[in-house]
Amino acid sequence: MHRSYQSILPTHNKLLQKRWDTTYYDEHRRKVRDAVPMVDTKAPPTYMHLHLKLKKLQLEEERLATIERDNRILLEKMSYIMRTRGRVDNRNNYEYKSLNREKRQRELLRVTKENQAILYRINMRRPEYSHKKWQEEWEENQKFMDNISHYPQEWWIRESPKNSPRQTAGADESARDDEEDLRRDQEAQKKREKEEKLAEQQREEDEKKKQEEAAREKEKQRKKQEEEEKRKEEERLKAEEERKRKDEEEALEKERQAETEAPVEEDNSGNKQNESNA
């Protein structure tokens, strides 16, 4: 009894009810299996023409084919040129010549000379202020101050026996300062003297250079004059030789004319004698 089909609802025939329920259940499962969802959750469709661009690939292949063909043609031309002398003579023996090189050289020489002249004027310029004059005026003012002062200068330093240790230390420090100032003044004086000597040497060198340039210029002028005189002497000798040659040619011409006229006169005299005899 327990193996028989137990229907949920009351029925007259359990066998038929079992078949009907089984058919309904199978139909239900089929519908569940074949049910279509209300929301499309599938991946979007893929289009081949978006991922594989055949036109782009075709253009790229055509471009590479064109490059390959051009390279092959160029290689053939290069190999032909290497095997033979080629069809074009590409040798160019032209030497670059500047049209304004001389002008630029003259301009550079002019600027250099002007700069040298400016430097010479700057070096030869005497200073407007004389430190020697200032020193003399300061010493003169010091003398005037000594004359009108009630106490001599640095009187507190000269009274060393009665000074306290502090005053003695101050005096020593002041003396050291004076010695340091004197040393600095002496060094500055030596430096100025050295600079003056260097300036004097520079002026002497400039003078020597000027003298050498003047001597070279005179030598050039002398050589130029000698060449001019030599050229004139050669022209004079050539003119004399030309005149002598012309005189000799004229003398020879006159002699030839005299020789040709003499036989004619003899023939004329012989003819006259024959006529008289006849």
Image: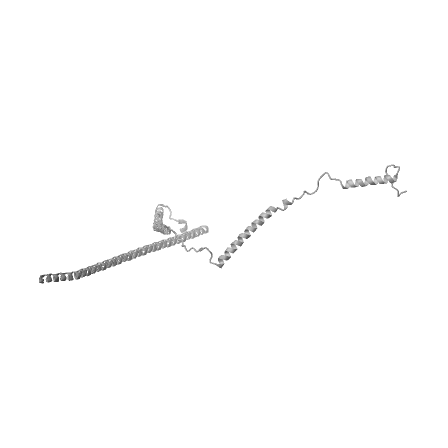
* Extreme residue in the front direction: 278
* Closest to the observer, 227 or 141: 227
* Extreme residue in the right direction: 1
Query: Does the rendering let one see residue 160?
Result: no
* Closest to the observer, 167 or 119: 119
User: Residue 20's x, y, as percent?
Assistant: 84, 39
Q: Give the colour scheme shown.
A: one colour
Q: What is the count of numbered marks?
A: 0
Query: For the C terminus, which image quadrant?
Result: bottom left
- Residue 22: which quarter of the image? top right
At 52% from the left and 54% from the top, the residue drawn is 73
At 59% from the left and 48% from the top, the residue drawn is 58
Left or right, residue 139 beside residue 32: left
At 82% from the left and 40% from the top, the residue drawn is 23
User: Residue 168's x, y, as percent?
Assistant: 44, 52
User: Residue 170's x, y, as percent?
Assistant: 44, 50
Q: Is residue 23 above or below residue 267?
A: above
* Closest to the observer, 232 or 149: 232
Query: For the N terminus, which image quadrant?
Result: top right
Left or right, residue 157 beside residue 14: left
Query: Does the rendering let one see residue 54?
Result: yes
User: Residue 137's x, y, as percent?
Assistant: 34, 48
- Residue 237: which quarter of the image? bottom left
At 14% from the left and 62% from the top, the residue drawn is 267
